[in-house]
Image (tube, rainbow, N blue to C red):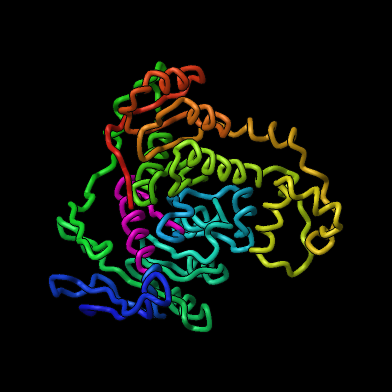
Amino acid sequence: MSKEMQLKYGCNPNQKPSRIYMADGSDLPISVLNGNPGYINLLDAFNGWQLVSELKKATGMCAATSFKHVSPAGAAVGTPLSDTLKKIYFVDDLGELSPLACAYARARGADRMSSYGDFIALSDVCDVSTAKMIQREVSDGIIAPGYEPQALEILKSKRKGTYNIIQIEPSYSPAELERKEVFGVTFEQGHNFLKIDEQMLSHVVTENQEIPAEYKRDLLIALITLKYTQSNSVCYVKDGQAIGIGAGQQSRIHCTRLAGNKADIWWLRQHPKVMGLQFVDGIRRPDRDNAIDVYISDEYMDVLADGEWEKIFQVKPEVFTKAEQKAWLEENTNVCLGSDAFFPFGDNIERAHKSGVQYIAEPGGSIRDDHVIATCNKYNMAMAFTGIRLFHH
């Protein structure tokens, strides 16, 4: 480990010089095993590492996240994958997957378009199963507490040997106070050491008071993910993984819609019509992702009209009608939703209901809390007020 690291440039090529260092003169808590990570890579790495290490502490399960531009595109714990999820995540040809590989498949696969070119964080030592999965994805780098020797060699082969591989000291803990400069002015605040656990879900304010254990776990995943997502932010979670993350929106309803649309696409990808698409031989995974996104959207009718489908599919797919999509979306249930600050209006709950949300955790404290609670009661949702805001900037 070293005391500082010179970087090629900052957020943009014109922002030079650039470096990271420890203000107290101590060693950095990381070692670069391969590559030359940049400024944004390291922001993603440090935020991602905090997220997965907290997920593991809260759930007792290994965790992974896929970061892009200082917000997670996906986050998950290592629950087993169904055959359907293996197929839509394009890992059904990899044989038996370790729990850590399952966690990354979920984190990467929930929103594959946003995860393209991600920075990965793993809570545990990267094993061969996970490394083989990462090897074939477009990714900028990875941070983990360690690497199995063979896994390290697999990852070093990526990007013609330039793949960024960072090892972090898992026992490292930051100082109580943190600082940053904006426009030459130094900001100082206490580091956010807030522990997120089931105690935060004890104040249930709706008529439905029951939040079963598996959904408490999913609400914790949502809240911990939000702790490291640029605000305003909301997170939809199902079966141990984020399925829709909305980040950095000025309006909370727009954030709820954005994340809800991502959750809907995740569910629509599992429809038999989408699962049955026959792609031309040799098409790359990112191109399949784009084609599926177009197939689900209104744009597909234009593609059919232009005859462009022949470049993508072996057989002309049937149109996936809006009526079919609506019926399929109604089958998605027991989704959990977290919000980094209170919902100011019941319209957020109405939108969440359309994406199958049944359990919610949010701080509470709006002057319209009664309206938000009443909207939850209308759909028999259970909602906990955490009393804690999770803004992150």
Residue 46 magenta: yes
Residue at left offset 58%, top offset 31%:
354
Find residue 231 and report its horizontal and vertical position in percent: 38, 47
Residue 84 magenta: no
In this view, 312 is above or below 300 = below
Residue sitting nearer the eye, 334 or 230:
230
Query: Residue farthest to the front?
Result: 183
Specify the quadrant of the image occupied by residue 18: bottom left
Label total for image: 0
Query: Residue farthest to the bottom?
Result: 160
Residue segment shown in magenta: 41-66
Residue sitting nearer the eye, 107 or 212:
107
Find residue 53 and report its horizontal and vertical position in percent: 32, 55
Residue at left offset 20%, top offset 57%:
187
Residue at left offset 28%, top offset 79%:
5
Task: Determine whether, in the image, residue 196 is placed left or right of residue 356.
Answer: left
Find residue 233 and report its horizontal and vertical position in percent: 42, 44
Query: Residue farthest to the left?
Result: 24
Taking the image as drawn, is residue 181 in sight?
yes
Residue sitting nearer the eye, 153 or 37:
37
Task: Determine whether, in the image, residue 233 is placed left or right of residue 197.
Answer: right
Q: Quadrant of the N terminus?
A: bottom left
In this view, 375 is above or below 224 = above
Taking the image as drawn, is residue 237 in sight?
no
In this view, 122 is above or below 379 = below
